Image (cartoon, rainbow, N blue to C red):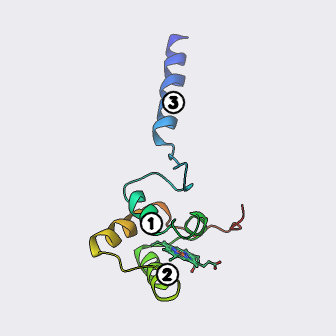
Amino acid sequence: MYKKIMIIISLSMVTLLTAEEIDNTTGLIADKGLGDVKENCTVCHTGRFIVVNGGDKKFWKRKIHIMQNAYGLWKIEKAQEERMLNYLSKNYSKKKEVSINE
Ligand code: HEC
C-alpha cells in the first residue's frame, strides 16, 4: 500500500515538473526569451499569431523580417533576435491547424 502511494506521488510530481507554464499576460509558454518576445512582438498583437504558427529558426527569422518589412517592427539587435529565434523555434516549432480566434 505504502509503495503504491509513493509511486502515485512520484508520478504526479513528474507531471507537475514537466508541465509547460503559460504566461498569464500573453498566453505564451514561459521560457527563456519570452521577455524579448513580449518587448518586440506582443506589443502589437496577441500571442495567438505565434501560437498558431510554427517552424524552425529559418521560419521565424522570415516572420520577423516580414514584421519589419511590412508591419513596422523596428530594428532588433542581433543578440536579442537570436534569443527570440531560440525561444520561438524551441517552443513553437510546429504549425497548429487551429483558428486564430480559439
Ligand atoms: C509594429 C507592429 C508589429 C510588431 C512589433 C510585430 N508584429 Fe506581427 N503582425 C503585425 C500585423 C499588423 C500583423 C497582421 C495582422 C493581420 O493580418 O490582421 C502581424 C501578423 C503576425 C503573424 C501572422 C501573419 C503571418 O505572417 O504568419 C505572425 C506569425 C507575427 N505577426 C509574428 C510576430 C513576431 C514573432 C513578432 C516579434 C518579433 C511580431 N509579429 C511583431 C504587426 C506587428
| Label 1 sits on residue | 88
Label 1 crowd (10 A; few <14 / some 14-19 / many >=20): many
- Some atom of ligand 1 lies within 8 Å of the CB belonging to the residue at label 3: no
Left or right: 49, with 31 as reference point? right
Q: Label 2, on which residue?
A: 67
If you read the primary sequence from the N terminus, does the residue marked by circle 3 or circle 1 appear first?
Answer: 3
Mark 1 element type: helix
Question: Tag 1: residue type?
Answer: Leu
Give the Cα separation between the discs numbered 3 and 2: 43 Å
Q: Is residue 26 above or below residue 1?
A: below
Which amino acid type is shown beneath numbered disc 3? Answer: Leu
Q: Residue under label 3, please give it.
A: 11
Q: What crowding class fits label 3: few (fewer than 14 Cα within 10 Å), some (14-19), or many (20 or more)?
A: few
Identify which residue is drawn at 54% across, 18% down: 4
Three-letter amino acid code at disc 2? Answer: Met
Q: Position of residue 52 (x, y in %)?
A: 61, 67
| Label 2 beta carbon less than 8 Å to ligand 1 | yes
- Secondary structure, mark 3, is helix
Residue appearing at x 49%, y 67% in the figure: 93
Which image quadrant is residue 39 in?
A: bottom left
Residue 61 % position (x, y): 42, 79
Residue 60 image point, x, y percent: 45, 75
Q: Earlier in the sequence, mark 3 or mark 2?
A: 3
